Image (cartoon, rainbow, N blue to C red):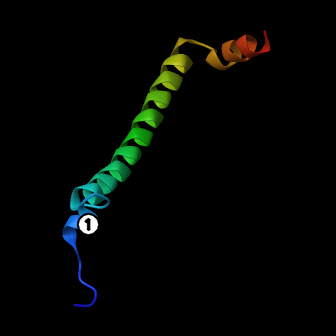
């Protein structure tokens, strides 16, 4: 019959659900990066308010 698609054959390797999961993962990665940046920004803001956190960090690294 020539080339025909056997869905049962592809079911184990690639499914529509897998494609959806990959798309969702891309959004999750973006959201995670934004969340991490927001956390760093919050830490930096708190550090700046509380004092010279950059100097404190430098002193810790130089020990």
> Which of the two residues, 24 or 54, is positioned nearer the viewer here?
24
Relative to 63, residue 47 above or below: below
Residues 14 and 60: in front is: 14
Residue found 28% across the figure and 56% down from its top: 18
The answer to which image quadrant residue 29 occupies is top left
- Location of residue 6 with respect to 50 vertically, above or below: below
Mark count: 1
Residue picked out by circle 1? 9
Image position of 58 with respect to 3: above or below: above
**Residue at the spot 73% in from the left edge and 17% down from the top edge:** 58
Q: Residue at x 39, y 36 (%)?
A: 35
Q: Residue furthest top?
A: 63
Helix, strand or loop at label 1? It is: helix
The reply, left or right, for residue 43 in relation to residue 60 is: left
Q: Quadrant of the C terminus?
A: top right
Which residue is pictured at 20% across the width and 69% down the height? 7
Query: Which picture quadrant has residue 11?
Result: bottom left
Q: Residue furthest front?
A: 1
Location of the N terminus by quadrant is bottom left
Q: In the image, 43: left or right of 13?
A: right
Q: Is residue 15 above or below residue 34?
A: below
Q: Position of residue 33 (x, y in %)?
A: 44, 41
Residue reaching furthest to the bottom: 1
Name the side, left or right, on which 39 lies relative to 50: left
Query: Which residue is farthest right?
Result: 62
User: Badge 1 local density, few (<14 within 10 Å), some, or many (20+)?
Assistant: few
**Residue 47's x, y, as percent?**
54, 17
């Amino acid at each position: 019959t020539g080339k025909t698609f056997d869905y049962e054959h592809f079911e184990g390797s690639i499914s529509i659900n897998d494609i959806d999961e990959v798309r969702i993962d891309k959004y999750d990665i973006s959201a995670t990066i934004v969340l991490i940046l927001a956390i760093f920004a919050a830490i930096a803001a708190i550090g700046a308010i509380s004092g010279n956190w950059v100097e404190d960090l430098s002193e810790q690294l130089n020990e």
